[in-house]
Image (tube, rainbow, N blue to C red):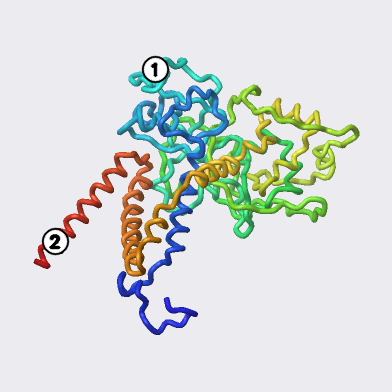
Amino acid sequence: MAANGVGEKRSAEEDVCGEDAVLSLQEVLEEDEALQDEACAVLAGSDHEKCSYPQGYVKRQALYACNTCTPDKEEPAGICLACTYKCHEGHDLFELYTKRNFRCDCGNRKFKQLECKFFPEKETSNILNTYNANFFGLYCICKRPYPDPEDEVPDEMIQCIVCEDWYHGRHLGTQPPEHVEFQEMVCQACMDRCSFLWAYTSYLAVPGVTKITPAEADAEDIEVDDEPGEDKLQNGVDIKTEKEKMEIPKHPNIKEEKNEPSSPSTSTTSEQKNVKKENSSPVKTETKPGVKCKLQEYKTHLGAVTKTATYWPNNWRSKLCTCKDCMKMYAELEVLFLVDEYDTVQSYENKGKTAEAQERRDPLMTALSSMNRVQQVELICEYNDMKSELTDYLKKFAEEGKVVKAEDIQQFFDDLRSRKRRRVDGMQYYCS
């Protein structure tokens, strides 16, 4: 901690906090800001005090499912952030991250014994909502929970931007790129449904790693009782025949366009089962007379493709053809959102971060500015201790897949104040 990297004496920070190295104030604030940004990215425009139902089918919002009210084997349902606090307090909830074009279900006919406290008079159902196994806490082609207490294999889960299910990296046919950043992923089933995307893979997609682990290979380690006669064909992927290693074609050298990679996206939205055309945001496109269809041009150079999930860099959607015929095809396939720049999870997250940055105040820096050096160091140490305890406290909720309630946070700080008060009283007694 000495200046110019030469450590000859212990600094004032080490004297106050002990011999362990202490994070600088800048590092502490940057880490705290990163955590806040992550939370804001998920919640974005979600309001914890107002149900989103009056807004209709919200373009993208943070959603939750209630295992208490709509358990497995019953109809799936999704609820907004405000309803988790007001209507489902104390229930077994799990987070779905974000979903596209969804209207809050809280209190409709799917909730037999519960009435929404915000809007009791809701329609019996939201017919344009789409659902998948995520609403029962099951993900990927292996249909396992996350976190999975029986899965000992560490693996990142990635969301398909079309069906919006989450997949284990090892179950995608080709693993995510190890040294190249990508922004979005399209699973194999959605690639087959939107087969026009295969023509773009050689020009736009990021090659994956050719090592694969079929879902059935994990089943040898994770025993799951299958229903009698259950077919192993899930999401259009025959997991019985995916034992062979696959290769994805490398990028040709394309001079006309370059794709700048960006950070990987960990996002979520609902399965693209029945999203209606009228819910897709209007996309304004202008095709100049005489301009050839980019898709048809790419198709003429399309070679053999390997049927796996595909990975895509930042802004790849802007390079999709928007000629009249292609726009008609997108509408028929109900994937007009692919050419909507505001549909991406990255756009959604940036919206949340921007809104938070405008409202954010820095009370810690204000307090520190009025303190001397020793007081500043003591405050930083107390802050680090509190952050460590809070992280351990919240980790239990994450491991159990539970939503953190306001009263949980309140209980933490009540306990913290109680412990601090006992320490102060003990010191006063000892000194006296």
Which amino acid, by three-letter code, is at mark 1?
Pro
Query: Label 2 crowding class (10 Å Cα cut-off): few <14, some 14-19, many 20+?
Result: few
**Secondary structure state at the residue bearing disc 2:** helix
Q: CA distance from mark 1 to mark 2?
A: 52 Å
Placement of 247 over or under 87, stated as above or below: below
Circle 1 Cα neighbour tier, 10 Å, few/some/many (<14 / 14–19 / ≥20): few
Q: Earlier in the sequence, mark 1 or mark 2?
A: 1
Is 310 in front, or is 355?
Answer: 355
Report which residue position mark 1 lands on: 120
- Name the residue at 44% across, 17% down: 122
Q: Position of residue 429 (x, y in %)?
A: 10, 63
> Could you tell me residue 347's position as x and y percent?
60, 41
- Where is residue 188 drawn, in percent x and y? 63, 40
In this picture, residue 179 sits left or right of residue 218: right
Which residue is at a point 56% across and 28% down the rendered structure image? Answer: 101
According to the picture, the residue beneath numbered tag 2 turns out to be 426
Q: Is residue 212 above or below residue 329?
A: below
Query: Which residue occupies the foreground of this view, 354 or 41?
Result: 354
